[in-house]
């Protein structure tokens, strides 16, 4: 009998070869999905990351009323969790941050079609040092229209891609987090020393974009909520 298959149990050293086998890479199993409450260290996962593409997508459930118009917004925050100036609020009416390191690529009014509905570009190394955190928000444009809320949306996701390599670092799917409110804090990208860490928040907010912006020191005009 071949010693490698001897199951007499007299010598445990026969199984030491198992420790030398390579780990199996199950390519068919998604490796980059995150859940609410998780933290993802972008710098450790991809040390080359600097210019990142933010992609957000969603679909609308079928209903007879006026279709929802969803918008992605970014807030650049200091150590006090406040914007420094109005241009630290990047959205469809302010497409570029005050220093040019954050760019909004345009507004989608329907969420129709496959792929990202709205995209943003961030250059991490060009962000001012007094920016400690970046908050990503998805909101309903006209929340005054009766019945408009996130219960009418599905297939919502947020992803971060290394633009230079086209590698998707992670994807956050948020359908389980959707409720009847009008605003959604997707998550925060926090500067910790020389590293950037994403926190998956997934929290809906009653009052929409205006309520979120007020907490960050921005007054949003009534027709921009």
Image (cartoon, rainbow, N blue to C red):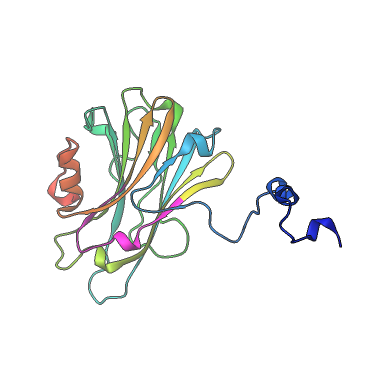
Which residue is at a point 14% across and 60% down the rendered structure image? 144
Residue 121 pos. (x, y %): 43, 40
Foreground residue among 180 and 18: 18
**The residue positioned farthest toward the front in the image shown:** 10
Which residue is at a point 78% across and 60% down the rendered structure image? 6
Residue 177 highlighted magenta (yes or no): yes
**The residue positioned farthest toward the top in the image shown:** 129
**The residue positioned farthest toward the bottom in the image shown:** 64
Q: Specify whether residue 11 is in view.
A: yes
Residue 140 highlighted magenta (yes or no): no
Residue 199 pos. (x, y %): 35, 43
Q: Specify whether residue 21 is in view.
A: no
Residue 195 pos. (x, y %): 44, 30
Is residue 72 shown left or right of residue 197?
A: left
Which residue is at a point 56% across and 33% down the rendered structure image? 48
Residue 101 sits in quarter: top left
Is residue 58 shown left or right of residue 114?
A: left
Residue 103 sits in quarter: top left
Residue 210 pos. (x, y %): 16, 47
The answer to whether 127 is drawn above or below residue 200 in the figure is above
The answer to whether 94 is drawn above or below residue 138 in the figure is above
Range covered by the magenta-colored residues: 171-186
Q: Quadrant of the N terminus?
A: bottom right
Please count the marks in the image. Answer: 0
Foreground residue among 67 and 150: 150
């Amino acid at each position: 009998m071949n010693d490698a298959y001897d199951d007499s149990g007299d010598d445990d050293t026969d199984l030491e070869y198992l420790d030398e086998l390579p780990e199996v890479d199950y390519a068919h199993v998604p490796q980059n999905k995150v859940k609410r409450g998780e933290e993802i260290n972008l710098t450790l996962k991809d040390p080359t990351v600097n210019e990142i593409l933010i992609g957000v997508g969603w679909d609308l459930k079928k209903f007879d009323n006026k279709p929802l118009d969803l918008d992605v917004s970014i807030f650049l925050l200091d150590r006090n969790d406040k914007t420094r100036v109005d241009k630290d609020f990047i959205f469809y009416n302010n497409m570029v941050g005050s220093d040019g390191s954050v760019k909004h690529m345009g507004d989608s009014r329907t969420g129709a079609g496959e792929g990202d509905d709205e995209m943003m570009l961030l250059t991490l190394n060009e962000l001012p040092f007094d920016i400690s955190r970046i908050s990503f928000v998805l909101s309903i444009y006209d929340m005054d229209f009766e019945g408009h809320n996130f219960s009418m949306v599905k297939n919502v996701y947020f992803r971060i891609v290394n633009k230079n390599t086209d590698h998707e670092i992670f994807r956050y799917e948020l359908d389980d987090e959707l409720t009847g409110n009008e605003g959604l804090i997707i998550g925060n990208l926090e500067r910790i020393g020389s590293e950037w860490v994403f926190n998956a928040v997934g929290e809906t907010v009653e009052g929409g974009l205006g309520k979120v912006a007020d907490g960050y020191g921005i007054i949003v005009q009534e027709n921009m909520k």
